[in-house]
Structure formats: structure tokens, C-alpha cells
Amino acid sequence: MTRSSVVTVLRVTLLWAAGISVLFPIVWIALASLKTPEQLNDPFLIAFTPNFASWQNVLSSGILGAAGRSALVALVTVGISVVVGSMGAYAIARYRAGGTLTRFGMLAAQVLPPAVLVFPFLTMAYALRLTDTLIPVIFSHLSFVLPVVTWFLIGFFEAVPRSLEEQAQVDGLTRFTAFRLVVLPQVYPGIGAAAIFGFTLSWNDLFYGLILAPGKAAILPVAIAGFNTFRGVQIGSMSAAILIAVVPVVIASFFIQRKLVQGISGGAVKF
Amino acid sequence: MATVRFSGVNKAYGTTSVVSDLDLELPDGSFTVLVGPSGCGKSTSLRMLAGLETVTSGSITIGARDVTHLQPRDRDIAMVFQNYALYPHLTVAENIAFPLRATKTPRREALTRAATIAESLGLAKLLDRKPKDLSGGQQQRVAIGRAIIREPSVFLFDEPLSNLDAKLRVETRTELLQIQRRLGITSVYVTHDQEEAMTLSDRMVVMRDGRIAQQGTPQEVYARPADTFVAAFVGSPKMNLIDGAVSGTTFTVGDGFALTVDQTAAGGPVTLGVRPDDLLPTVSDGDGAARVILIEHLGPRAIVTIDARGTELTSVVETSRLSGITEGTPVDLAVRPGATHFFDPATGSRLSG
């Protein structure tokens, strides 16, 4: 065998391994959601008649309400993050606003353990009588989505030539209108990707949701966790709920994969 | 239409001075070119006029208005950048119409006027295209169309031809000049290319290290450069500058060679300046004052590099006069009468007389 065909075989094997390790859990969960509790005892059972009891249980349990609340929180969080983040990213890209400290600070915000911030949030929620509502959840999500979105967009703004907004100013626009009508359209793809990325981060959060809105305002990951009951884990129902949570995000991520890499690499990688 | 005036303009970044004491008056309708090497302050001066850079001290007026602290959009100017700065998300028609739309002209009227201008620039068939689907020359014309549409008081050009290939550059240069003449709008043009400066300008301003080295008509600057810097910068190939001493009509270099020059009142050590076009080599009977090292043929002319006892000189000779001159030929040198320049060897300034 030649050297390059060995490399190719290795590459293909690696890709298959990666693909399987990512897809296998999703497939397994999909199958699990269609099994009866008895069938679930045998994890390797593949051929069986699908049973929709788990799905019925899940859909009547208010999971869709939780999904709706998750979507609302994510949308509001992303909406605010994109508006504020794009302006922040522009300022950082053009004027190095805040210096290196700000840029690294944003990175640090993503690394910060949520346990550090959750208690202050809870205290404030109590003081404002907003416990178990979505507002504290939105604010807590902003604490990590906004820095990520801003950081993501910096590279995209740096790629827009300065002469473009200078030309717009000479042509008659104020600095802000030039930003809005000329610079922003150049980064729309980046904003779209940042929005979907931010949406995913907010959608997946369990920790803040669990502490700040554990009851009637529960968001989706919290509701999924709720299938871990006193009587044991209801695997079938939980699997169905997990699918509801996971599948939309997987599909959305597929569409933004290129821009995702571009944003995470700070615009250094261009397609 | 307006006179542009820079009065005592300074630009400094912290302690670094980029433009010092700039005093310049540009008459209404003139085409002024700011030319000089990289870092001389020409682009900064243009950008201060545009309002894209702040002025550290001094004032700039356009017509009767002091624009020193006005926003770019309030200065009634139009600008063409080196990379054209066309809006990628808009069509050609929308690009050209943009300045009108920015000042709230109704869309239909703006697009109609844009179409007329596009027509005059040969862009009529490209109105619905996006900038990325245009060639460099077409993009440039869209940028010019966008500048023209508002009929501003002043046109500003920041090296707009640098991104074009040589041939297109010459063609577009001519078009640009014709447009400016037709519209009669005061224009300020920045370039590092002295040939462009010579062909385009009514008035040429040679800049160096943030100051004006010389200003005048291209003919004045070419014929009577104020110092060795301007002398070497303007004109291609570069003027021959030789350090030596002059006495009467004889110029000598050390114990090297001697040259007969114009009568001058100056005596003693000088820097002699002779343009290649004015240095005439003739085939020598004997050893000759110098030897030809290299001949570069350009068609109607040739650039001849000559070694004169250790001093390297350049001469431009018409091909018809080249007979007998080949690489290695000994030659005598003569200077065209009236074509010698004398400069102070210490300061580089022109010596009168």
C-alpha cells in the first residue's frame, strides 16, 4: 500500500469514528423514545415495534410550554445580544475600545463558572419579587451570550474596510447611520451565525434555569431534568423530550457551520 | 465651486508631527496634485480637508466657510478612495445615487440622475450589476460617477489610479482630466507617482516630511526645482546629481572627470544637476571622458547608463542618435545649454545664478 492511501484510509476511519460518536447518541435516544419500559432494559435492541406512549406522555406533560419558554428566553437574549453586541464589536474593531483587557474579559466571561453569578442573580430576583419568572433567566443568559456574540463579531467587523464607512460619511451620512446602512449589511452573515450560536447557548442552559426558574416558569432543559423522578429515570419520556430539545439546534448549526468557524477563529479563517 | 485654503495647518499624533505649518491656497476650478514619497503627509492633508482626520491646529476653508471642525457630510465635498469604496451590497445605480439618497432625495429622482451620469461614463449597461461583477476600470468609473452626482464644491482623490494596470491608468487619467475640465470643480488629488502629478495638475505641490518642498505649475517645478529632493523626485529617469566644484564654465569631480556647464555666478563646491534628457553622449575618438555601461531600449528612446571616471550618470538618447553607441563605447559628454542646475551641497537648496 502506498503512503498516501494509508493516510487516506486513516483519514476516512477517523471521520467515520467522529461521525458515529456524534450521531450514535442521537440515534440511540430516538430509538429509546419509541421503546416500552421493558424494551428499554435491553439497550441493544434495534428491531422492535415502535411504541408512542413515551411521546404521548411527554407531549401532555407541558414540555411544549417549556420549549416555548426556552425559545422566548433565547430569542430575547439573542435579540439584545445582537443589537448591543454588534455595536460593541464595531467599537472594539475600529477603536480598540476597552483595550486588550475588554477583549480578554469577554473570553473570561465564557469561562466563568455559573455558580459564581447565580447567587447574586437569585438575591436580586428575590428583592425584585421576580423569582421563578423568566426575567432573571434572561439576564443570567445575557451574562454569557452577550460577551460571546460580541467577541464573535469583532473579526467580521475588522474585515470591513475603513474606507467604506469613510466614503459613506463623505457621501452624507452621520457616523451612526453609516454604521447602520453601510457597515452592518457587510456583516449580516456573521450576525446570523452569531445569533444562531447565541440561541444555542441560551437554549442549552440548565444551571441558571434550574436555580432561577425551577417551577412554573421552567425552561426546557429543566423540564427534561424533571423526568428524573423519585420513582427513577423515565428514560423513554426523557428521550423524547431530549429529541425535542436537540434536533432543532442540530439543524440550525448545520446551516451556520462555516460562519461558526470564521467567528470562533476571530475572522482569521476566511471561506 | 470654491477656493480651498489651508492656513497654518498642523497635524500631530502625540509628539509625532505628520504635517507642519501647511499654508496652501487652491484657486477655484484648479486641479492641484499633492505629490511626494510615502509618509510625506499628502494623504493626511487630504483627509484633513475631507474631515476624516482632525486638525491639531490651523484652519481650513472651502469658499467662504471655515470647515475645520465640520463633519465630512457638512463640507460639500466628494471623495474617491484608492480602493473605490463601492458599497458591495448595492447595485451600480444605487451606488451612484447614494449621495443623493443620503441627503433625502426621492428614490426615483436619484436613480434617474444616476442613470444619466452612468450613461456619460459608459456604464449604462451595468446599472444592475453589483461591484464584485465589475472590472477595476468599471469600478473606478462608478466611484467617479458617485462623486460627480452631487456637484460638490471640491473633489478629493486619494490615489484613485494606483490599483489599475499601467495602460488603464493612462487612459483613465485622461478621462478624469476631461471630466474635471468640463465640470470646473476644484480638485485635490494625491499621488506618489510624479508622472501622474505632472500630467494632471494645474498646480503641483511636492511634499516631504510633512512640509511643502515646492509648489507651482508642473513646468515650473520641472524646470526650476527648488532643491535636490524636488529635482530628484520630479522627472523620470531621475535627474543626475553630482557633487563637485564649479569654476567659470567648468565643473569638475575630484580628480575624475570635467564637464562644461552654463556660466554661473556660483563658485566652489556645488551639487550639479543635469536631467538625463539634457546630457548628450557622443562617440569619442580617443579614450573619451566616460564609458557606456548599459543601454535600455524603450522604442523611440533609450536609457543609457554611463560611467564617468567613477561617477554613474544616466542619459536619455533618441534612438536615431544612438548610432555608434553600444555598451562599452567610450563617449564624450556635453550638457544642453540652459539645462544645468546648481544646488548647495550642504543644504540641497537651489543656488541662484
Image (cartoon, coloured by chain):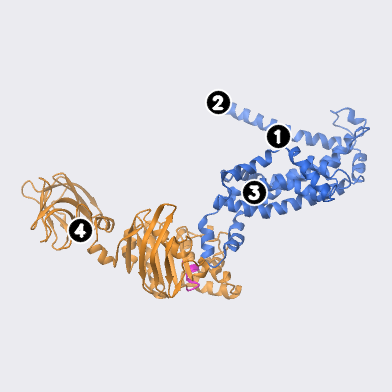
Chain colours: A blue, B orange
In the image: residue A140, left or right of residue A107: right
Tags 2 and 3 on a common chain: yes
Between circles 4 and 2, the one closer to the viewer is 4
The residue tagged 3 is A150
How far apart marks 1 and 3 lie (CA) works out to 31 Å
Q: Secondary structure at mark 4?
A: helix
Return the disc, 2 or 3, that comes first in the chain's sequence. 2
Image-quadrant location for residue B1: bottom left
Disc 1: host chain: A
How far apart marks 2 and 3 lie (CA) works out to 45 Å
Q: Residue at x 24, y 61 (%)?
A: B226
How far apart marks 4 and 2 lie (CA) works out to 65 Å
> What range is drawn magenta here?
B144-151
Tags 1 and 3 on a common chain: yes
The residue tagged 1 is A19
Q: Are marks 1 and 3 in contact (CB under 8 Å)?
A: no
Residue B331: x and y in percent read 11, 50
Tags 1 and 4 on a common chain: no
Residue B31: x and y in percent read 36, 69
